[in-house]
């Protein structure tokens, strides 16, 4: 396992390159940040679940030949808004927040990327600057592909190019949904309720409750719904008081999903 500093035009970030996995005695090598390291795209246990990764074996082999893998701690930056696009990042594990900032320092988080997504895709394809900043919100592993290599790969692999078009479409629809949430919601309470329900969508409901992991700070939640940290803190306290949810560290339990839905629908 090799570690070092990678530099971009705006800041330094610490990167851990992945080399290893199983030691000669058959035991697992310690992995950085407690991650489940995925050493090869072909052996990835989540490959078939993910849009861009679920490709024919020969195509995945060609993809693996041009990727370099690295792990990142919480707080690391993959790329910065306005930085010339140097390539894409395929997120293997962890979550990354994509945000934009105004000249006066206000920040809006557009979305939180999930494993399997290709980050920096629009700018890499068009040859422009990254339109967003990508910050790691929990320890993550990502594969990087330089722009020229990625474009060459798409030219030679039509199905991969189709998957890229599909993800660009999904990103567009997600952006529209985010603008609808921020622009058309009538109150901060409605925005927060909608956010919690969308975050909980991928978690199972058991005995009338949904238990989910929420690693975002109140400030980050505020940046996602276009509100203030103080408002988010007040609303969460109000939701707890009304027995709509319970918070235990980074674990949030939605105790009354129907009540949150009624806030959204009015």
Image (cartoon, grey):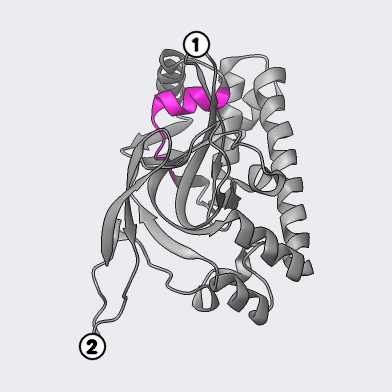
Q: Which mark is residue 24?
A: 2
Q: Quadrant of residue 11?
A: top left
Q: How many marks?
A: 2
In the picture, measured across the screen, residue 220 lies left or right of residue 161, that is: left
Q: Which quadrant: the N terminus? A: bottom left
As drawn, the label of residue 87 is none
Instruction: Specify which label sits upstream in the sequence, 1 or 2.
Output: 2
Between residues 2 and 261, which one lies in front from this camera angle?
2
Region rendered in magenta:
213-225
In this rendering, position of residue 27 left or right of residue 229: left
How many residues crowd mark 2 within 10 Å: few (<14), some (14–19), many (20+)?
A: few
Residue 115 visible in the picture: yes
In the displayed structure, 65 sits above or below 89; it is below
Q: Residue furthest left?
A: 25
What residue lies at 60% left-to-right and 23% top-to-bottom?
Answer: 191
- Observer-nearest of 101 and 126: 126
Q: Residue 53, percent across and down? A: 62, 66
Q: Is residue 217 magenta?
A: yes
Question: Measured along the vertical axis of the image, is residue 107 above or below residue 29?
Answer: above
Query: Disc 1 vs disc 2: Cβ atoms closer than 8 Å?
Result: no
Which residue of the protein is positioned furthest toward the bottom in this rendering? 25
Q: Quadrant of the C terminus?
A: top right
Q: Secondary structure at mark 1?
A: loop
Label 1 to label 2: alpha-carbon separation: 55 Å
Image coordinates for residue 37, horizontal then vertical, percent: 38, 67
Return the x and y of residue 96 as percentages of the image width and height: 48, 44
Q: Which residue is mark 1?
A: 104
The residue at the point 54 percent across, 72 percent down is 64
Seen at 75% across and 65% down, the residue is 155
**Residue 231 drawn above or below residue 251:** above
Query: Callout 2: helix, strand or loop?
Result: loop
């Amino acid at each position: 396992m090799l570690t070092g500093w990678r530099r971009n035009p705006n800041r330094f970030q610490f990167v851990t390159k992945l080399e290893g996995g199983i030691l000669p005695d058959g035991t697992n090598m310690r992995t950085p940040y407690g991650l489940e390291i995925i050493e090869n795209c072909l052996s990835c246990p989540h490959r078939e679940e993910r849009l861009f990764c679920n490709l024919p074996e020969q195509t995945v082999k060609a993809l693996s030949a041009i990727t370099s893998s690295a792990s990142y701690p919480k707080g690391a930056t993959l790329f910065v808004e306005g930085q010339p696009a140097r390539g894409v990042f395929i997120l293997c594990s962890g979550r990354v927040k994509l945000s934009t900032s105004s000249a006066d320092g206000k920040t809006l988080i557009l979305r939180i990327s999930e494993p399997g997504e290709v980050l920096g895709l629009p700018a890499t394809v068009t040859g422009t600057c990254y339109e967003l900043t990508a910050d790691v919100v929990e320890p993550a592993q990502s594969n990087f592909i330089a722009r020229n290599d990625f474009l060459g790969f798409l030219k030679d692999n039509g199905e991969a190019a189709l998957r890229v078009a599909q993800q660009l479409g999904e990103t567009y629809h997600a952006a529209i949904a985010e603008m609808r949430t921020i622009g058309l919601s009538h109150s901060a309470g409605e925005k927060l309720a909608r956010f919690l329900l969308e975050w909980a969508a991928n978690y199972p409901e058991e005995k009338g409750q949904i238990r989910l992991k929420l690693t975002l700070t109140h400030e980050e939640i505020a940046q996602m719904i276009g509100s203030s940290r103080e408002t988010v803190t007040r609303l969460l306290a109000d939701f707890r008081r009304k027995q709509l949810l319970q918070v235990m560290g980074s674990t949030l339990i939605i105790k009354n999903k129907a009540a949150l839905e009624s806030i959204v629908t009015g």
